[in-house]
Amino acid sequence: MCGPSGVGKGTLVAAVRARLPGVDLSVSATTRAPRPGEQDGREYFFVTDAQFDELVATDALLEWAQYAGTRYGTPRQPVLDAVARGRDVILEIEVQGARQVRQRLPQATFVFIAPPSLDELRARLVGRGTESPERVATRLAVAESELACVGEFDVVIVNDEVDRAVDQLVELISRSRAAGSTSAPVEGTHEGEA
Ligand code: 5GP
């Protein structure tokens, strides 16, 4: 699942998991500092630059990317283990990382969560109050470039009404389960590291 910072991915994922059993959320590693209320191991594994280098060097990440000055990556093994146990795993990541996942887990479904408009996104980012004005500006610039990539995704969901967006996600996962498209983990090549 991709979508600009502030679009509400976290809220949607929590609501989907409350409605559908068997859905895990991958916990990423990041070099950014925790926001107030974030806990190590829950929202993210908060790591140092050196620790992140080590994760990359040991090929422990399914994908990773630089975003707004910090690095983020998906620990590989928990995702593969969960898929092998027949669970669905949501990766809440940015677009460069999603491209790597497409190469390595081509059976994944790629969903883009879009804001109703950039003005609305700006209002949400400012209202969240977690970012400085400079960081809001950086995130909006990244958002614009991410919105230009929507054509790469299997499904685009506009988060104008949370309940409707959650319904769409629940239906998507249910349909994909019925089609059995999540049942055969095939990991592709590790080439083309970012
Ligand atoms: P935030 O700092 O707002 O939590 O996240 C910033 C961006 O990084 C969001 O677009 C989020 O989806 C993305 N992100 C979070 N974890 C990962 C990850 O493991 N890999 C990649 N590629 N992006 C991530």
Image (cartoon, rainbow, N blue to C red):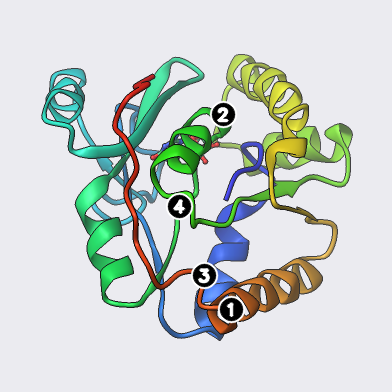
Query: What distance separates the C-alpha of mark 1 from that of mark 4?
Result: 20 Å
Q: Residue at x 34, y 37 (%)?
A: 34
Measured along the vertical axis of the image, is residue 64 above or below residue 13?
above
Q: Secondary structure at mark 2?
A: loop
The residue beneath circle 3 is 181
Dot 2, how many residues are within 10 Å of its Cα: few (below 14), some (14-19), or many (20+)? some
The residue beneath circle 4 is 91
Judge from the rendering whether residue 9 lies leftward or rightward of residue 150; answer left or right: left
Foreground residue, 188 or 50? Answer: 188
Q: Secondary structure at mark 4?
A: loop
**Amino acid bearing label 3:** Ser
**Amino acid bearing label 4:** Leu
The residue beneath circle 1 is 179
Give the image quarter of residue 118.
top right
**Residue 76 image offset from top left, x and y in percent:** 25, 47
Query: What distance separates the C-alpha of mark 1 from that of mark 2?
Result: 41 Å
Q: Is the C-beta separation of discs 1 and 4 under 8 Å?
A: no
Q: Secondary structure at mark 1?
A: loop
Q: Earlier in the sequence, mark 1 or mark 2?
A: 2
Q: Residue at x 48, y 49 (%)?
A: 106
